[in-house]
Amino acid sequence: MRTIGFKKCIGWIVVVLPAIVIKIISSNPLWVEHYYSYGLYPVISTTLRFTLGWIPFSMGDIFYITAIVWVSYKIVRLVKRIRRKQFSKLYLYRTLRKMIFVLLTTYVAFYGLWGSITPGRV
């Protein structure tokens, strides 16, 4: 099996580290309030309002719908291949890895850009 390339490894690090930070910070409401609500979120909010405020619909919704459609498509494709017995362990591994990456990216984007990282909601 081929190893994951350097760029893919960096991509995973860029997605996994924020997910871990979100999980850790969400365990303490004071950290959420201090670091996210009063620190990071005002910068994110102002940037998004400035860059995307002119668009009359939610870009987040488009992003989430696209991710859901893509993951659904991959699941249907995987099930078809399994039923036809046309899949290998490598195909299964790569498909699951891609789906996890997309879901994790969606999780980080939601909680980092638009969501609330309060305890019990992560």
Image (tube, rainbow, N blue to C red):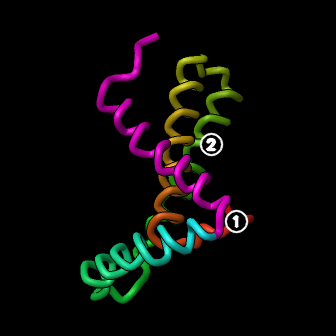
Q: Amino acid at mark 2?
A: Ile
Query: Of the residues under marks 2 and 1, which one precedes in the sequence?
Result: 2
Give the image location of residue 53, x and y in percent. Answer: 31, 86
Residue at image point 55% right, 71% down: 115
Residue 90 magenta-drawn?
Answer: no
Secondary structure beneath dot 1 equals loop
Q: Is residue 103 above or below residue 52?
A: above
Where is residue 108 shown, x and y percent of the image? 50, 56
Judging by the rendered image, the residue that carries numbered circle 2 is 75
Q: Which residues are magenta?
A: 1-29
Left or right, residue 35 beside residue 72: left
Can residue 61 be seen here? The reply is: no
Q: CA distance from mark 2 to mark 1?
A: 31 Å
The label shown at residue 58 is none
Going by the numbered disc 1, the residue's amino acid type is Pro
In terms of secondary structure, what is the magenta stretch mainly? helix
Residue at coordinates 47% horizontally, 44% vertically from top-left?
17
Residue 39 visible within the image: yes
Rendered view: 109 above or below 72: below
- Quadrant position of residue 12: top left
- Up the image or down, 72 lies above or below 58; here it is above
Q: Nearer the viewer, mark 2 or mark 1?
A: 1
Q: Which residue is mark 1?
A: 119
